[in-house]
Image (tube, rainbow, N blue to C red):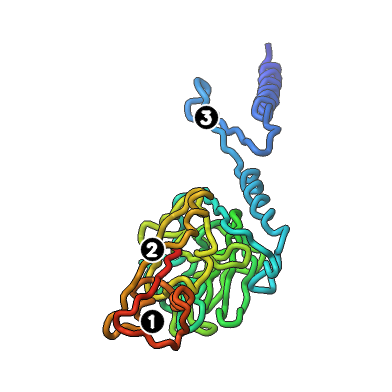
């Protein structure tokens, strides 16, 4: 056989082999979510299939779940989008995780707590920071509000799947805009002293349908970053700043069932005997009972003088 014939047969063999190889490599590659790669390091004796899953479908599913929380009471122009919504307490708050992401990335120093302060309700906690420090989201969610709010200054509000909204106030700069989907730990803005603030700090509020809950009842603000319970019941006592002291943490009793929540509303009474130098303000502060509660229980006014040896009934709601 001549050289030209050998060459012709050889060329046809190479063409056929090329088509066969392309067919093998193309076979089965019809699912855009799964890509099969072939490791040729030991070819032709062996091959290893490596499956790389495309996570876009999972991501879309998560985003769809988050966007579902924007269907009701979604007003991006106001601080409270739940005006005139009635809440029947106690209510159950559910969490999927046992920890949260701290809103600042260093030790949290709480300078003022949820409670009555300077004759007004303080509906969140103040966490010390320096202007420009990063402020991040505690949980996944959707930004409902990113604007200036009277008193709070530059504010970002994130709504979460369990019905809570976390509020980050007195910021100096925004890093997100309304309707943004955010992940826990994602930058929301930078701390500052905008609005009615005495020095730079983060004013953190936790709302449920527009009503503020004492954040320290839900979250441990130590370095543990723990959520108090995955299923926690909130009574009306934990949404009334007047029952709390902004200078100290209220005694915590975590309510895990509805029955415990209802039972906790029964007031406990204690008799206090007035001593020399006592004032209603001092008695209130030391015993973690509001002045209003003392006055109501003893049928007196804030201006009523108290005497040494006088017995006062103190009613505890926690």
Nearer-the-camera pick, 218 or 226: 218
Q: CA distance from mark 1 to mark 3?
A: 83 Å
Of discs 1 and 3, which sits in the foreground? 1
Picture residue at 56% right of the left edge, 53% below the top: 92
Callout 3 crowding tier (Cα within 10 Å): few <14, some 14–19, many ≥20? few
Picture residue at 35% right of the left edge, 69% below the top: 271
SS assignment at label 3: loop
* The residue positioned farthest toward the left in the image shown: 276
Of discs 2 and 3, which sits in the foreground? 2
Quadrant into which the C terminus falls: bottom left
Question: Dot 1 corresponds to which residue?
Answer: 280
Q: CA distance from mark 2 to mark 1?
A: 20 Å
Q: Quadrant of residue 208?
A: bottom right
The mark nearer the N terminus, 2 or 1, is: 2
Quadrant into which the N terminus falls: top right
Question: Dot 3 corresponds to which residue?
Answer: 40
Report x, y in % for residue 195: 54, 83
Q: Is residue 177 visible?
A: yes
Nearer-the-camera pick, 313 or 223: 313
SS assignment at label 1: helix
Callout 2 crowding tier (Cα within 10 Å): few <14, some 14–19, many ≥20? few
Instruction: Please give the label number shown on residue 69.
Output: none
Picture residue at 46% right of the left edge, 51% below the top: 229
Question: Dot 2 corresponds to which residue?
Answer: 251
Callout 1 crowding tier (Cα within 10 Å): few <14, some 14–19, many ≥20? some
Report x, y in % for residue 151: 56, 82
Numbered circles on residues, count: 3
Of discs 2 and 1, which sits in the foreground? 1
Q: Is residue 2 left or right of residue 259?
A: right
Nearer-the-camera pick, 212 or 302: 302
Q: CA distance from mark 2 to mark 3?
A: 66 Å
């Amino acid at each position: 056989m001549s050289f030209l014939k050998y060459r012709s047969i050889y060329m046809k063999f190479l063409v056929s082999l090329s088509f066969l190889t392309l067919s093998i490599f193309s076979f089965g590659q019809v699912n855009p979510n799964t890509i099969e790669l072939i490791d040729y390091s030991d070819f032709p004796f062996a091959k290893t299939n490596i499956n790389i899953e495309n996570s876009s479908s999972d991501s879309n599913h998560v985003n769809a779940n988050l966007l579902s929380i924007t269907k009701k009471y979604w007003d991006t122009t106001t601080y409270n989008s739940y005006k005139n919504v009635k809440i029947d307490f106690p209510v159950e708050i559910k969490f999927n995780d046992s920890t949260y992401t701290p809103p600042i990335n260093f030790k949290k120093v709480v300078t003022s707590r949820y409670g009555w302060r300077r004759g007004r309700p303080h509906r969140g906690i103040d966490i010390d920071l320096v202007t420009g420090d990063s402020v991040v989201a505690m949980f996944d969610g959707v930004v409902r509000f990113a604007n200036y709010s009277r008193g709070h200054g530059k504010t970002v509000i994130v709504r979460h799947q369990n019905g809570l909204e976390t509020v980050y106030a007195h910021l100096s700069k925004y890093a997100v805009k309304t309707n943004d989907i955010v992940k826990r730990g994602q930058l929301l803005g930078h701390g500052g002293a905008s609005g009615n603030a005495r020095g730079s700090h983060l004013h953190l509020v936790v709302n449920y349908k527009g009503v503020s809950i004492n954040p320290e009842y839900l979250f441990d603000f130590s370095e543990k970053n723990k959520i108090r319970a995955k299923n926690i019941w909130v009574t009306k006592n934990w949404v009334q700043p007047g029952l709390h002291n902004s200078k100290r943490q209220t005694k915590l009793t975590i309510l895990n069932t509805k029955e415990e929540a209802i039972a906790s509303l029964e007031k406990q009474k204690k008799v206090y005997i007035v001593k020399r130098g006592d004032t209603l303000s001092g008695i209130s502060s030391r015993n973690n009972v509001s002045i209003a509660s003392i006055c109501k229980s003893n049928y007196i006014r804030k201006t009523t003088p108290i005497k040494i040896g006088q017995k006062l009934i103190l009613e505890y709601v926690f």
